[in-house]
Amino acid sequence: MTMATERDLGRPVTVEPASFPETVWTEKVTIIDLIPRSVAMIGLLVIVLTLWWSVHHFQIVSRIILPSPQEVAADIIFVGKNLLSGGYMLAALWITTKEILFGFAIAIAIGFTLGVIVGETSFGERALLPYLVAIDTMPKVAFAPLFLAWLGFGIGSKVALAAFIATFPIVVGTAAGLHASDENARMMFKSLGATRWQTLFQMKIPTGLPHIFTGLKIGAVGVMAGAITAEFLGGGKGLGELIRVAASQLQTPRVFSLILYLSALGYLLFWLVVFAERRIVFWHRSTVAGIETRH
Amino acid sequence: MTQAVQTAIQASAERLGPPVYQLRNVTRSFAAGRIKALDPVDLDLREGSFSAVIGPSGCGKSTLLKIMAGVTPPTTGSVMLYGSPVVGPRTEIGMMYQQATLFPWLTTIENVLLPIKIREGAAAATAKREQAQALLDLVGLTGFENVYPKQLSGGMAQRTSICRMLITEPQVLLLDEPFSALDELVRDFMNIELQRICMSRNATALLITHSIPEAVLLSDTVYVMSPRPGHFVEAVDIDLPRPRTLDMMTSPEFGEYVRHIRNRLDLEAASA
Ligand SMILES: Nc1ncnc2c1ncn2[C@@H]1O[C@H](COP(=O)(O)OP(=O)(O)OP(=O)(O)O)[C@@H](O)[C@H]1O
Ligand SMILES: [Mg+2]
């Protein structure tokens, strides 16, 4: 072993040669965590379809209640053809889409405005918030008959219920977002002599965007529920009406396939919001339903 | 105690320019008077002077700085800056906080230009881009002007926030533990840089710190604060030549100052 020579305080780092066993070790991972996403998803689908098929095949429940996967698949193709050829189903899909988009746009406008009033002004927090919370705790679909009575059986009542349901999560998200800025950031803007509007638009709203988008994502789900509920209760010419009619005629395969197309529509709207979030809130890792996706 | 402060004020008056900050009888209490954060504080800062405030955690240092910056009002007392009362934020003041507080949706240079954008508008901010770039170059951030804060290390973020403070060319710098999140080496470098900037602009600075050597290294006067409710118990004039260098930290006088201040702080902590 070499020692420091002369008056240097430091010395080269030296170690004695030795022969130790390799200590390369691996972290324990269970097999279920190693399955790639695509395999996992397809695997689960196969399991569910097989179960479904056996329930149908062995007639565990009546075949009228539960059609076979093949029947549903055939109907999905039938509906798809109708949609692509511009048939009556496309018209229905278009009506429901319009209801959802208008409803969502109105919910965003009202929800954001109310959220800013609640989150930014003490009037909003003291006077408005208690009422909003009270309404939010009500089962909102119970308002559907009212909207139908007020707005008739056309698209208006569906838009109204869709917007009504989607507004509240956006209010909550916006208000929470405006409170998300930290003490330092607020003090900084204050010490720079920023106006209330400057603080709001240049600091509080950008800081709150992740919360606002969480509200939008919840709202996007609610808007679908609102539109379809209103269609069930108030007729009209949308997809919900088609489902109701098919169910009343015990055309269960049709019900299943229409629900599938409906959920595709909802999925599209949801991912539109997620896509917008990834573009606008680029500095923040977006999450779907609060779960970070691993990459 | 007041005797010591008085003599200190006189001593620095002889050496330095006219008063910039004058605080008289400033107190602050919270929770409807139940928590006293600041006992009466008197303070004079002379033009071009560098002062440090050192004291135990929670003694009211940040509160004092916020009052001086016009961000919160005092409960009693008066704060004058350049002869006029401080009743709100002032453009002469540049502030720096313990956290860098950069905004993640702005690039480095946009963060630096934020004070200009808020005070004078977006056009003025664009016009100052070159100056912002020069400041970034000065602190060694060339090439990082267009990245977002997520890509900066803690030290780089803190350097950006120095630039943000300097872009408005403040005559008064209020610094609340600006470098406490940095490692020792970067911190030393930043401190020397800070001294250079202050000297070249004849800026008046007040630094809050927990590091006694840092206070001694940079200051003309170190104010020692008591535990809460905080007040100044001693003003220590640091008679070391300028510009200060890191080598001075090993000198016997330096050690003497550090020891003296440490003893004073220990004494206060023991009597609290
Ligand atoms: N907004 C507030 N409301 C109530 N009490 C407060 C408030 N701000 C500060 N205080 C109290 O005032 C005292 C002084 O706080 P201050 O932040 O000035 O301490 P400090 O000296 O800066 O401490 P540190 O060194 O830990 O930063 C603390 O005891 C704190 O509890
Ligand atoms: Mg503090």
Image: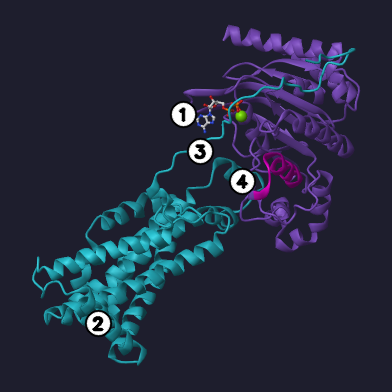
Chain colours: A cyan, B purple
The reply to whether callout 3 and callout 2 are in contact (CB within 8 Å) is no
Numbered disc in front, either 2 or 4: 2
The residue positioned 79% from the left and 31% from the top of the image is B191
Q: Chain of mark 3?
A: A
The answer to whether tags 4 and 3 share a subunit is yes
Cα–Cα span, label 4 and label 3: 52 Å
Residue B228 drawn at (x, y percent): 57, 19
Image height check: is B269 above or below B171?
above
Q: Chain of mark 2?
A: A
Image height check: is A226 above or below A200?
below
Q: Secondary structure of the magenta portion, mostly?
A: helix
Disc 2: which residue: A75
Residue B164 drawn at (x, y percent): 73, 47
Disc 1: which residue: B32
Depth order, front residue of B86/B187 = B187
A243 on left or right of A99? left
Residue A120 drawn at (x, y percent): 47, 53
Q: Amino acid at mark 1?
A: Ala
Q: Is residue A281 visible?
A: yes
Asked if the beta carbon under badge 2 is closer than 8 A to the nearest atom of ligand 1, the reply is no
Depth order, front residue of B50/A216 = A216
Chain part drawn in magenta: B151-165
The reply to whether callout 1 and callout 4 are in contact (CB within 8 Å) is no
Report the disc number at residue A26.
Answer: 3
Label 2, secondary structure: give it.
Answer: helix
Q: Amino acid at mark 4?
A: Lys
Disc 4: which residue: A190
The residue positioned 36% from the left and 74% from the top of the image is A265
